[in-house]
Structures are given as structure tokens and as C-alpha cells.
Amino acid sequence: MTDDVASHYGGDGDLSNAIADSLRRAGKDMDRLTTADLATVDEFHIRARKATLEVARSLNLAPTSRVLDIGSGLGGPARTLAETVGCHVTGIDITQAFCDAATTLSGWLGLSDRVDFRQGDATSLPFDDAMFDAAMTIHVTMNIVAKDKVFAEARRVLKPGGRFVAYDVLQGEGGDVQYPVPWAREPSISHLATPDEMKALLTDAGFRILEVEDSTEEGQRWFAEIAGHLAKSTPAVTFQAFLGNDFPAMAGNQVINLRDRRIRTVTYVCEA
Ligand SMILES: C[S@@+](CC[C@H](N)C(=O)[O-])C[C@H]1O[C@@H](n2cnc3c(N)ncnc32)[C@H](O)[C@@H]1O
């Protein structure tokens, strides 16, 4: 199952080279890249950097915080926290190609000293108990059956009182998901929890839920804004760099899935 997930995301070849080629073709100076230049490819979730900044606020961070990002992808969310708060973020992800690219992209932005990435499984974290002040997971558990293990592991590696924020895609009340979607080309690697299941899973793992925020409608508005931007100009690089030619269909289905409430996006702010 985890191999299927990694090959869904992994793409072919060296991802950071493919991203660099796209950026150069768009006339970007690789010595003067900014977080904004990468945000269209490295914040791989609905509402992108805006959502990450909301998660950051809910995590109650200080520059001295040690933060864990579970399912860190290309490292955009980790770098956003490191850059805006000054804290240290460790990312873990099942997809080796993403971990490698996350490390390279962090070097381009001069953030290598504040982030690190390693390959691993969210259901069995390679960290000691109570190592982190805060943890987050953004659009990850929809690929994982054993969400109970993910949340138990997040709880274990957090210091008592530490914040955990899960921002996820959930099963909505509007029917089955229309595929392909960015996290799955077909249903075998898609495992969406309902909002009620999510609450029970987090509570059973020992978290106190402090806040629940449904951003489904905001997600719809965000997609409409993106469509408006795309009508005027094409970004230097997009998720197509690793999702390939399926990406336009995936994005189209996200709009339909949100509109029909086949999916919902919800953020859970929790305390260990
Ligand atoms: C949609 S991406 C989100 C990446 C990142 N959180 C972001 O928002 O930019 C989902 C990520 O979850 C990772 N993932 C899926 N199953 C995982 C598992 N069992 N353990 C760790 N990472 C996993 C994938 O490799 C992928 O990078």
C-alpha cells in the first residue's frame, strides 16, 4: 500500500531538476528564488500557503520550537513555518523522491539549517517520545488506512501540552469521490474519514480537540480565484511537474468534489 502511494506521487526521474528546468524556462533567476516562486508546486494542498499560515498560527510557535511535519511532501509548509516563525521543522514523508526534492528546494531558498526531511511512514515514526513542541499534517491521512496509528504516533512524539493541527480532506455527504484526484488516480489508495470519524480518531489517540474549522466553501472560492489567475498568466511550475498529464483532470475533479460536497476540507486544532 505505501509503495502504491509513493509511486502515485513519486513521478519519474529527479524532481528538483524538473522543477529547476521549468523555473529557468520561465526566466527565473535560480540564485534569487523566493518562497513565492515555488508556492505553486510546493504547497500541495487546497488553499496553499494561506492555509499553511493559518496552521502556523494555530500551532502557537516560537523561534525555539521544534516542529514535526507529517507527510511533508516537497517541504513547502515546513519552509513556510521556518521562514515566518524562525523555528526548526523536521519533515517525514513516505515518498523518497519528495524528501530528496524537499532537501534540494530548501537549499535554493537558503533554509537548509532550519528544515530537514527524511523518508518514513507516518504510522511508525522514527522519533523518540516527546521530542517535538508541535506537529502538523496537511492533506496526508486521506492516503492512510491506519489513521489511528498516525494520530497515536503524533501524540507519542509530542511534548505534553504540545499542539497538533490536522488539515485534511474528508469524505463529504454528497456521494463518492470523482477520480482522478491529486491524492489518488483511483479508489484503492484513497481512504477518506468522515468528520465524525476524524473527531473520534483524534480523541481516542489522546488529543483534546480545541477547535474545528470547516473550510470547504473557502476552498471553492480559492479554486475560482486560481482559475481567474490562470486565465491571465501561466505559473512557472505546477503540480503537473510530478502528477504529469493527469493533473488538469485531477484539478477539475477537485472543483466538482468540493461543489457536490463529495469532499470537505476541515482543520482540527488539538492539544496533546
Ligand atoms: C497531497 S501531499 C501533501 C504534502 C504536504 N503536506 C503539503 O501540503 O504540501 C500528501 C503527502 O503525504 C505523503 N504520504 C502519504 N502516505 C504517507 C505515509 N503513510 N507516511 C508518510 N507520508 C505519507 C505523500 O507521499 C505526499 O507527500
Image (spheres, grey):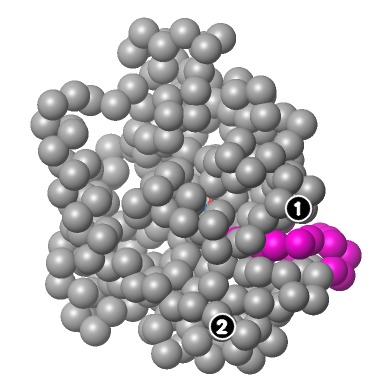
Q: Residue 166 in magenta?
A: no
Mark 1 or mark 2, earlier in chain? 1
Magenta range: 118-137
Residue at horizontal 77 percent and vertical 69 percent from the top? 158
Residue at horizontal 33 percent and vertical 13 percent from the top? 26
Q: Secondary structure at mark 1?
A: loop
Q: Residues within 10 Å of mark 2 (few under 14, many from 20)?
A: some
Residue on which disc 2 sits: 209
Quarter of the image containing the C terminus? bottom right
Q: Is residue 17 visible?
A: yes
Q: From what the image shows, is residue 121 above or below residue 85?
A: below
Q: Nearer the viewer, residue 21 or 216?
A: 216
Residue on which disc 1 sits: 65
Q: Secondary structure at mark 2?
A: strand
Q: Position of residue 252 (x, y in %)?
A: 18, 52
Quarter of the image containing the N terminus? bottom right
Q: Nearer the viewer, residue 61 or 201?
A: 61
